[in-house]
Image (cartoon, rainbow, N blue to C red):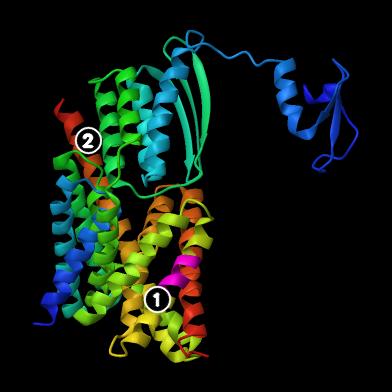
């Protein structure tokens, strides 16, 4: 409606597009167009008093659900959480649809207020402590032990909870990589070499993990890990490069995605299950591709 | 037998490492390590009896899930806190690597062997999760039914 009040004289998306506002006949560049619309037609924000009880209850329950899903919660848990919190707060009707990247929920309260809200999930990471904290918030809300405002405060605490310090996370990567090298039959020397590969995986995952696409990041980190393993085996020919690589692969592999996807499908969440399964297969293929590049370039294969 | 001791220790330390990577709270890590140890023990026992990846992974996953479920009920926390890192030693990392390695070497018979082993392992874990989830679901239904009857 607002956009119709502008006369576009160029194609949408072109670099030098300009618009003329019907209201004030001012020429506008594409960059300032949105700002101009907002200044001409200010959006009236709803004050907190205007929000219905349904809005508030659904907002809090979706805050919990969103962060549960972001830190590795299952689809069934997310849906159950929203439903339980809304019912505990007096909802008479709750509808919830959740997939790995989206939550849509609608609620009707006992005072006949009604609300529908959605949340888009862009990224997920496994954070079991946060999952536990949010689950406790949900449990306490459902049991009536805390109010919505107390829940909001605890959600904020869970969201901004500090992770383990960098040195401990790096040590965990090194320790895990070495453990799985020994687990799959490597010597203690292979395990020691694997710690270095684990450290590189941690550094590159931390630096690039949030900046580039997930699959590109995994491919890049796999290539770096494979290259470091081969370089170490050049320096110390006694090392078993295969077992060092296997130990480090365990840090990247989507371990339980396949099983979780089947469980999701078993419980009727077919779309989520399929999405998880396809993601697991693509990730496994990406890891294989990443490790195969240094094997081809420096490993003498092919 | 003596070879198994470092392997078992590595399975448990790997599980603890993953618990830290997954940001498990410090007070839960001993329980996670316990789940990891039991899971690997069951895997070894079943692998000794059947020598079939599917059965041993199914049994180990089933045990890990049930154990995680019980701990979750006792400690009032999501089961995945114990299950996700606890089962990590079953993940077929070596199968994936050797499948890729033999494929690059164009040794298709070797690749097929590892590919089958990897797929059987994945299916065993998936079947274990499905069976255990169904068992827990049925148990909750029966418990709720009994509770309603008593009321």
Seen from the viewer's position, the closer of residues B60 and A132 is A132
Q: Is residue A36 above or below residue A168?
A: above
Q: Which mark is residue A228?
A: 1
Residue labelled with disc 2: B145
Residue B64 left/right relative to A257: left
- Picture residue at 35% right of the left edge, 78% below the top: B117
**In x, y percent, where is residue A217?**
49, 61
Q: Residue at x 46, y 33 (%)?
A: A96
Q: Residue A157 in magenta? A: no
Occupied quadrant, residue A17:
top right
Q: Residue furthest front?
A: A235
Residue B65, by quadrant, is bottom left
User: SS at mark 1?
Assistant: helix
State the count of labels: 2
State which chain disc 2 sits on. B
Q: Is residue A87 left or right of residue A296?
A: left
Q: Is residue B7 left or right of residue A80?
A: left
Question: How far apart are the alpha carbons under marks 1 and 2?
Answer: 58 Å
Q: Residue at x 17, y 41 (%)?
A: B73
Q: Position of residue A35 (x, y in %)?
A: 71, 25
The reply to whether the C-beta atoms of the residues labelled 1 and 2 are less than 8 Å apart is no
Q: Are marks 1 and 2 on the same chain?
A: no
Q: Which structural element holds mark 2?
A: helix
- Picture coordinates of residue B137 (x, y %)? 27, 46
Up/down of B53 relative to A14, above or below: below
The chain that hosts pointer 1 is A
Can residue B133 be spotted in the picture? yes
Magenta-span inclusion, residue A223: yes
Residue A173 in picture, x, y percent from top left = 29, 62
Magenta residues, start to end? A219-226
Q: Residue at x 72, y 27 (%)?
A: A34
**Can you tell which of label 1 and label 2 is closer to the viewer?**
1
């Amino acid at each position: 409606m607002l956009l119709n009040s502008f006369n576009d004289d160029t194609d949408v998306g072109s670099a030098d597009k300009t618009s003329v506002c019907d209201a004030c006949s001012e020429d506008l560049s594409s960059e300032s167009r949105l700002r101009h619309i907002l200044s001409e037609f200010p959006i009236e924000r709803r004050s907190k008093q205007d929000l219905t009880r349904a809005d508030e209850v659904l907002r809090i329950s979706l805050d919990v659900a969103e962060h549960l899903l972001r830190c590795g919660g299952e689809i069934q848990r997310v849906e159950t959480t929203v439903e339980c919190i809304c019912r505990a707060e007096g909802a008479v009707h709750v509808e919830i649809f959740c997939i790995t990247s989206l939550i849509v929920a609608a609620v009707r309260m006992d005072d006949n207020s009604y609300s529908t809200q959605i949340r888009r999930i862009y990224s997920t990471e496994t954070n079991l402590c946060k999952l536990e904290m949010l689950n406790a918030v949900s449990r306490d809300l459902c049991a009536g032990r805390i109010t919505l405002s107390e829940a909001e405060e605890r959600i904020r605490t869970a969201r901004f909870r500090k992770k383990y310090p960098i040195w401990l996370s790096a040590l965990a990567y090194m320790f895990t990589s070495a453990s799985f090298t020994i687990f799959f039959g490597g010597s203690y020397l292979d395990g020691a070499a694997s710690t270095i590969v684990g450290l590189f995986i941690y550094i590159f995952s931390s630096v690039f993990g949030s900046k580039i696409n997930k699959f590109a990041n995994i491919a890049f980190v796999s290539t770096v890990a494979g290259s470091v393993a081969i370089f170490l085996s050049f320096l110390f020919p006694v090392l078993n490069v295969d077992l060092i690589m296997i130990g480090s692969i365990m840090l990247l592999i989507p371990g339980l995605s396949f099983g979780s996807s089947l469980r999701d499908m078993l419980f009727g969440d077919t779309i989520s299950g399929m999405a998880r399964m396809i993601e697991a297969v693509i990730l496994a293929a990406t890891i294989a591709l990443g490790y195969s590049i240094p094997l081809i370039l420096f490993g003498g294969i092919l | 037998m003596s070879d198994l001791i470092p392997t078992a220790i590595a399975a448990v330390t790997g599980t603890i490492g993953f618990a830290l990577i997954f940001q498990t709270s410090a007070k839960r890590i001993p329980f996670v390590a316990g789940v990891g140890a039991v899971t690997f023990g069951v895997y070894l026992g079943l692998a000794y009896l059947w020598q079939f990846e599917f059965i041993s992974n199914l049994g180990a996953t089933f045990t890990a899930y049930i154990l995680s479920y019980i701990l979750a009920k006792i400690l009032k926390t999501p089961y995945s806190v114990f299950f996700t890192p606890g089962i990590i030693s079953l993940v077929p990392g070596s199968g994936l690597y050797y499948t890729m390695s033999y494929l690059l070497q164009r040794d298709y018979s070797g690749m097929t062997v590892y590919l089958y082993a990897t797929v059987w392992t994945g299916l065993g874990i998936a079947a274990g999760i499905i069976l255990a989830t169904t068992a827990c679901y049925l148990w909750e239904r029966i418990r709720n039914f009994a509770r309603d009857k008593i009321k």
